[in-house]
Amino acid sequence: MATDAGFWISQAAHSLAATSAAPMEVYGDWAPETEECWRIIKNLESTLEQFRLSPRFTISDDLKVGFFSTDHATQTDSSEILPLKELSLATQNLVQITKSLQVDFGFLKQLIQLRFEDRLKEESYRLFASLRDRIMTIEKHYQQNEESLRKCYNQQLADAIGTIKGMYQQYFEVEEEKTSLHDAMTVKMNILSKRLREKEEVIKELREELDQYEEYGFQKVDSFIKESSPLKTTLEKENLEFKMENERLLQVISELEEEIQLSVKENSVLEDEIISLKEIAEKDHKTIQKVNKQKEDLEMRRKYDAIVAKATREVPAVMQGEKIKQSVAKIEEEKRVLEHQIQVLTSKLEREKKKSESFHVLKNEMFTRHTLFRQFAVLADTSFNYVRVKPLFVQSKTNLATVTTSSTSVDHSSSVNIKYEDVGNNQISFPLSQQVRSEYLEEESRKEKQSTPQNTTESNTAAPE
């Protein structure tokens, strides 16, 4: 039984090797992993051949298998029997190898089909171009022949008309001189009859010439048509096929254009939403600024009330007149100092308001320029003769410094947006450096110190006393 199983397995291995050897030779480059599998198969074949050649001990047909070792009829070792597990594993490996080969062959088939289709498309386009050029040359040649024939016939007609006209004028003048003696009516009739006869003769001659030219020309045209008739049939078929392909491509293009229009509409809707969100954010920012200003005003009032209350508490209930006057003078000085500070703060707030308003105006202008530049870029890129000229626009340090102060006073988010200004008219702006900011802040601090009087320091020192 074991020998039969080995025989059939060896036959299956030989058949697999015979069927799959050729594709492995052809497609060895595509599947490098299959070489190891084929080595395993060759090793299995060599082992099977060894089993065939080396005769084993015959096992009796009366082999009994039971639950105990004493049930065996023969005394044979386990090494004499071919291990079935190894054979089953070998068959499983062979099945896996065949499946992987089938998958590889499927991929290769698809790849070859795609390459074949691409090659067919290239050849078809090439044939279409060559046939189209050939048809255009034939049409041009035919039109040139027609124009040359028409010019020849027109020239002949013009020459004949000129000769008839000259003969008519000469004959008419002679007959006028002769007919001065005869009756007018008879002479005119004779003259007209002669003219008609001459014209009829000329017309007959011209018709004969035209018939000759037409016969000669139509013979050439018929021969040309007969020669080009088989080409026309093939060309017409190919033209129909190419027309069908063109219609299909036009449909695809129309669908793509519709999708582009839908995407453009969606982009416009999203831009409108972005604009509305920006407007809402600006409104929120304005409300936050108002609330902050109100808080600052309340804090200033509280400080002023606290200072007044401290001053009133420190004054004793019973004091002399001079001390009362001195305390009142000190209080008045403190009031003046506080009023001056309030004026300075209000002026600063007004400046910040103006800066914030100018910043918002600039921001709106930046946004409008950016949107217009987008639209202009889309329209300009459609043309082929579009040349972009982008001049650089470098701002001065003073303008950059003003922008930085306004941005720091308003909000951190607005400062980030000011760093990169509008690119609407293809102009480039550079972000502010830290040195310029520090220099400008130092100059502002110096100006404030110079503007504030020296009494503020004295009042600040006297207040805690």
Image (cartoon, rainbow, N blue to C red):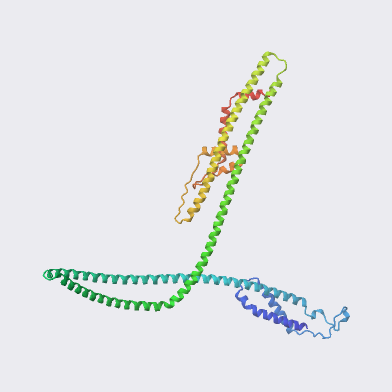
- Where in the figure is residue 261, as x and y percent of width and height? 54, 57
- Residue 29 visible in this rendered orientation of the protein: no
Whether residue 426 sits left or right of residue 180 in the image: it is: right
Whether residue 223 sits left or right of residue 238 in the image: it is: left
- Where in the figure is residue 407, as x and y percent of width and height? 58, 39
Q: Is residue 96 above or below residue 365?
A: below
Residue positioned 61% across, 43% down in the render: 281
- Where in the figure is residue 104, as x and y percent of width and height? 63, 72
- Residue 139 visible in this rendered orientation of the protein: yes
Classify residue 141 by image quadrant: bottom left
Whether residue 389 sits left or right of residue 54 in the image: it is: left
- Where in the figure is residue 61, as x and y percent of width and height? 82, 86
Q: Quadrant of the N terminus?
A: bottom right
Classify residue 421 by image quadrant: top right
The one nearer the camera, 47 or 304, is 304
Q: Quadrant of the C terminus?
A: top right
The one nearer the camera, 303 or 259, is 259
**Looking at the image, which residue sits at the far top?**
321
Residue positioned 65% across, 24% down in the render: 461
Whether residue 355 sits left or right of residue 76 in the image: it is: left
Q: Is residue 43 above or below residue 387?
A: below
Q: Is residue 438 above or below residue 86?
A: above
Residue positioned 50% across, 52% down in the render: 377
The one nearer the camera, 128 or 217, is 217
Q: What is the tally of numbered marks visible in this picture?
A: 0
The one nearer the camera, 465 or 268, is 268
